[in-house]
Amino acid sequence: MHSQRIAGAFAVLSLMTATATLAQGGPGGMPPTAVETASVEITSLDQSVDVIGNLRADESVTLRPEIAGRIEKILFTEGQQVRKGEPLFRLDAALIRADLNEANANLALSQRSFDRAEDLIDRKLIAQSDYDSARSKLSVDRAKQASARTRLDKSVIRSPFAGVVGLRQVSVGEYVSVGQALVDVVSIDPIKLEFAVPELYLSQVKVGQAVNLRADAFPGERFAGEVYAVAPQIDLATRSLTVRARVPNPDGKLRPGQFSSVSLVLDRVSDAMIIPEQALWPLGDKQYVYRVVDGKADQVEVRTGQRQPGKVQIVSGLNAGDTVITAGQQKIGPGSPVNPLPPRTAPATPAPAQ
């Protein structure tokens, strides 16, 4: 019995020695496992929140006449870029010009009458009431002249700002009434972006923050803008904060009414640690990474942050300069000897035969 116990103990000791030798890749054991690796990358990273936004014109107005009249001329083509103050419609102003001419004549007569009255009142040759009447008549005729001149000015309808003219709703020769819709003018450079941010981010949203948007109509393109206004109160129905940004739109690609995917940059980390996403090795509800230390696999728990396509931020658990295993984790365990290899790259496309 005693001999059997000694033989069993010797067998267990031999098995442990062989296992250790195999794990260390020593003489007579398996060679170190080949694994693909990558170094921890230190880069700047934007901390952002992704929402859905709606594009709006920077300025938008429907032009309507302030006086009634017949349209004499249309001075633009639909979809045309126009400058601020550029004339767009001209109404028939023949009667207004006649009124202005009459007002000018009456004003000239009133001015002469008042000048005479002023000379005579100084010499005490007319009564004060006659002088007051001449002065009142001059004031009335001046007001009539100003009214006629204003109506003449309003017979030309101008663009209130630089923008793009829409589709007109009237034609030459048509009689339009006061307040009738004529055409829309919109300004879309820059274009406004409106979106709602959950109230969770209330303390982080500020004027001047950067936004990036993507529109379905332009896959693969990104448009950058900047927050210029934040609503002063939370929307009670949605528990969100309305934010507005301006996005340069010099080529007019973006149009009012478009929906877009918006990424609001809340903060920027200048020294974020980034590793390939395939380096993560989840166990239960925790995330681990194998790093290479002295030729062996060292398993460490990590805490992740933001994710990018194919990459993930590591908040804690790694240090700059660490080398992590990105492929081959299923063949190793903690402490296993490894042979680090660089990550595989896509084969180069052969050049066409000459």
Image (tube, grey):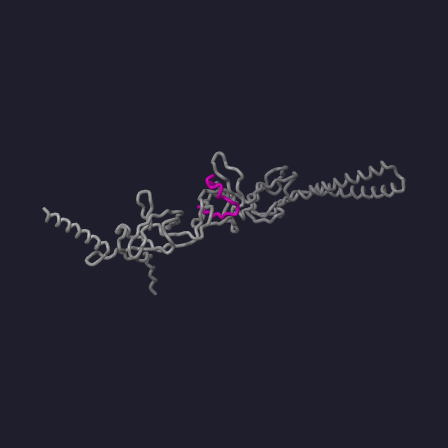
Left/right placement of residue 223 relative to residue 132 reads: left
From the top left corner, tell me how far across and down residue 169 is, in percent: 57, 41
Rendered residue at 49%/49% (across/down) = 224
**Residue 79 place in picture, x, y as percent:** 55, 47
Q: Residue furthest bottom?
A: 354
For the residue pair 277 and 145, the one nearer the viewer reads as 277
Which residue occupies the foreground of this view, 330 or 187?
A: 330
Q: Residue furthest top?
A: 237
Q: Which of 222 and 106 is in front in this view?
A: 222
Residue 203 location (% of width, % of height): 49, 42
Nearest to the observer: residue 154 or residue 248:
248
Q: Does the magenta stretch include residue 259?
A: no
State the image coordinates of residue 151 (x, y, percent, origin top left). 69, 41
Magenta region, residue range = 197-216
Residue 208 part of the magenta segment? yes
Total tally of numbered discs in the picture:
0
Q: Which residue lies furthest to the front in this view?
A: 2
Q: Quadrant of residue 296?
A: bottom left
Left or right of residue 128: residue 39: left
Residue 199 lies left or right of residue 125; in this view the side is: left
